Amino acid sequence: MSGSGSAGPGGGCDPLPILLWHFLVWATSRPMGGGLPAEEWYKTYKIRKGPGDFYSFVFNDTMGYERGTNAGVLVEDVELALRGHVEDGYKFSPSQLMEGDRYYNSSPTLEDRVHVLVSVLPADSLSVISEEVLRKMREVTLAASYTGIPQLAILTKVDETCPKTKKNIKDAYKSKYLKEKVDESSMMLSIPQDCIFLVKNYSSDDIDTTDDKDALILNALRQMITFGEGYLNNL
């Protein structure tokens, strides 16, 4: 999963959405277009099903696309990660990971490769995403397209973006304003509108889980899994 910045936390009430909640917290709360990145390492997260048992899918997180010289993840490193060449624990740096380096996987298996690329954007601040950050994101989505990797996007903070949705999260997909944000995101990343999903965020003063909020997150998770399975089935 890759993101542009400050999209904030999501939430859930059972092991799947709780993991996704933590995932969205660190994957989407990076500074927008500058500042220090919240995460500098390439990390793989498994979802525990029970003692010693995990679900058959994982999340891989990259450093954010901060702007500026020597800031943010290198597009080349993300492209390597898509092909399975980046090992868990690699610390991103201004220098590209090269063959022979400690965390370079020279013989990636199908399991090591990325099966679906998820871009995360904050719906309430799309307009402040810099052109430099967008350029990086577009290059990565283009690289994914070349290799046949399916792509989807998650728009977070929909409750902070639309007053109607803040009053009733069930109206998220009925909101004309959020539909405009979906269209805007689609144009920014060249991802079809029906591959962009809305998420309601939990915050420090709103940590209670609800079925309505969790439904949005579980829908996004279901689509990630469906996209990934479709990719594997077509290999």
Image: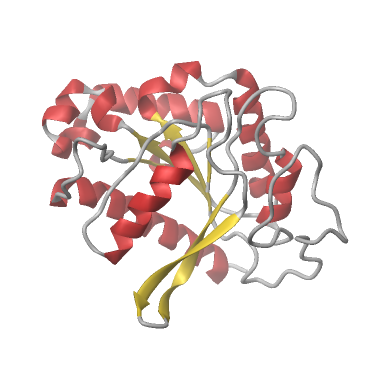
Q: Is residue 53 above or below residue 85?
A: below
State the scheme by which the image is colored. secondary structure
Q: Position of residue 6 (x, y in %)?
A: 44, 30
For the point 27% across and 49% down, which residue is it?
11
Q: How many dots with numbers?
A: 0
Quadrant for residue 52, please give it: bottom left
Name the quarter where the C terminus is drawn. bottom right
Q: Position of residue 159 (x, y in %)?
A: 24, 30
Residue lying furthest bottom in this view? 52
Q: Position of residue 182 (x, y in %)?
A: 38, 30
For the point 29% across and 55% down, which residue is it?
218
For the point 51% across and 25% down, which residue is it?
32
Quadrant for residue 213, please give it: top left
Q: Is residue 86 above or below residue 92?
A: below
Residue lying furthest left in this view? 167
Horizontal side of 203 relative to 191 (left or right) equals left
Q: Is residue 151 above or below residue 164?
A: below
The foreground one among 8 and 36 is: 36
Residue lying furthest top in this view? 127
For the point 37% across and 51% down, which residue is it?
22
Quadrant for residue 86, please give it: bottom right
Q: Position of residue 73 (x, y in %)?
A: 67, 39
The foreground one among 114 and 87 is: 87
The foreground one among 199 and 144 is: 199
